[in-house]
Amino acid sequence: MAELIELLPANYKNSQEVVELQEALGNQIAAAAAAKADVFKQLDVNTATWGLRYWEQAYGLKTDVSRSYDYRRTRLLSKMRGQGSTTSSMIKNAAESFSNGEVEIAEDNANYQFTVKFIGTKGIPPNLDDLKDAVEEIKPAHLKAIYEFTYLVWYELDAKNWTWAQFDAQGLTWNELEVLS
């Protein structure tokens, strides 16, 4: 943005009072523009910060300011995706937003249950409890959710044809080995 003093006739540039006034006005205009941009950021869940509490209130979620913005956004997006009649694809979308990996939903209508199977990444997602809470909010009350995880099995490890020395050279912990792909 051009300096305000540059918009005035040249003789005003000689007045210290006018220069300072224009500088102060310029600072206020810049602050107002920044505030406006920040307010517009709050209108999108993906960029909201202080406005997340309004989104959470609108979707009936409890606000927990001790949680990160990313966590709160993920929860909101999951809730937003879960509006309307519940379908397996809706649960799949919500589960994938929490697990950051591919999920498969297997319905077992005869037993009033369904299985959420994590097939995109191995191991247990780090925020499984949050995912379970989101699925509980979405699913019909009469259905039971079962969670199934994928792990490394020995034949997959054998397929790497590592010697013990090569295996030791990997320097993997047991948890790292469990999710090795």
Image: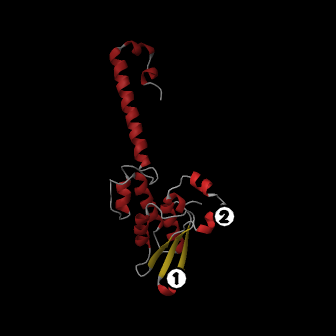
Disc tally is: 2
Q: Which residue corresponds to mark 1?
A: 108
Tell me the colour scheme of the image.
secondary structure
Question: Which amino acid is tagged 2?
Answer: Ala
Q: Nearer the viewer, residue 85 or 17?
A: 85
Q: Position of residue 114 (x, y in %)?
A: 50, 78
Mark 1 or mark 2: which is in front? 2
Q: Against 99, is 68 above or below?
A: above
Q: Nearer the viewer, residue 58 or 161?
A: 161
| Label 1 element class | strand
State which quarter of the image contains the C terminus: bottom right
Which residue sits at x=35%, y=26%? 24
Q: Earlier in the sequence, mark 1 or mark 2?
A: 1
Q: Position of residue 22 (x, y in %)?
A: 37, 23
Residue farthest toward the bottom in the current orientation of the protein: 110
Other-residue count near label 1 (Cα within 10 Å), few / some / many at <14 / 14–19 / ≥20:
few
